[in-house]
Image: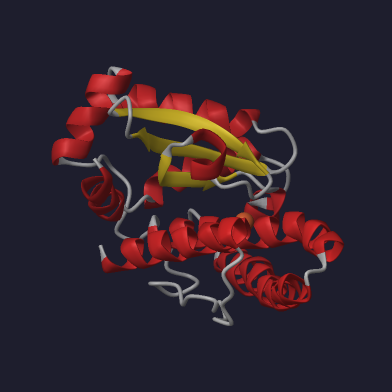
Amino acid sequence: QCCWMMLENQCRIFLRHSLTKETSRQKHTLPDLPYDYDALEPHISAESMWRHHTKYHAEYVKNLNMIQEKYLEALQMGDVRAETTLKPARMLNFGGHFNHSILWNSLSPNGGGEPKGVLLNTIRRDFGSFEKMKQQMSAASMSVQGSGWGWLGYNRLRRKLEIATCSNEDMLQSETGLTPLLGVDAWEHAYCFQYNSRRSDYIKSIWNVINWDEVSKRFKTVH
Ligand SMILES: [Fe+2]
């Protein structure tokens, strides 16, 4: 719960800065994985996890800190043009950092199977069955054109679980208003080292390592 709340807080602070031009020099850091790189084998290979974490996620964090620095300088100088130019890259790299931080927490070597309790009941209520939710989310993740994510999110206004997709590293909440519960990274970098271009095989496999206890904890904090 603590971990999810930290993430949520980070996101809120980031988005507030975009809106009110508050300044902060706080550096973002690459979170450690809560398991070893080879822990999700054979479903996700050690090489895939290592590259995904140390190359792709680390790159987002590095770029985010660099852009953040320039962005704050632009704000302080009143350089509106630089501020506008930097905004998309700032959003992309923050989104990449945020989405991947959720992803690592949603996986576990002891994962797979079905969730329990309130989350399972709500999935059954909103999708008919766990299997139907899985099919819908797999299909959504497959349908992402180019790079993006498939998500299971919670619609707080309608009090309902929903499936959605986002392009690139767009953040689910900013794009759709849904609170993110579980994301499937449909970028090629997530699966190409193990599955080549077979995104469907990777999506089939990822269900074996979903940490439903963590996803349930997150659901408890938002519904
Ligand atoms: Fe990724």
- What is the tally of numbered marks visible in this picture? 0
Question: Looking at this view, is 196 or 162 the one in front?
Answer: 162
- When asked about the image quadrant of residue 40, the answer is bottom left
Question: Looking at this view, is 136 or 168 the one in front?
Answer: 168
- Give the residue at x 45% y 29%: 163
- Give the residue at x 61% y 31%: 142
In the displayed structure, would residue 200 be above or below residue 27?
A: above
Question: Looking at this view, is 11 or 182 the one in front?
Answer: 11
Return the x and y of residue 27 as percentages of the image width and height.
57, 81
Quadrant of the frame with the N terminus:
bottom left
The answer to whether residue 181 is left or right of residue 44 is left
Return the x and y of residue 170 as percentages of the image width and height.
62, 46
- When asked about the image quadrant of residue 67, the answer is bottom right
Return the x and y of residue 80 as percentages of the image width and height.
81, 61
Quadrant of the frame with the C terminus:
top left
Furthest residue in direction left, as rendered: 117
The answer to whether residue 101 is left or right of residue 123 is right
User: Can residue 41 be seen here?
Assistant: no
The colour style of the image is secondary structure
- Give the residue at x 23% y 53%: 217
Return the x and y of residue 174 as percentages of the image width and height.
54, 43
- Give the residue at x 22% y 38%: 119
Furthest residue in direction top, as rendered: 128
In the displayed structure, would residue 18 be above or below residue 65?
A: above
In the displayed structure, would residue 36 be above or below residue 108?
A: below
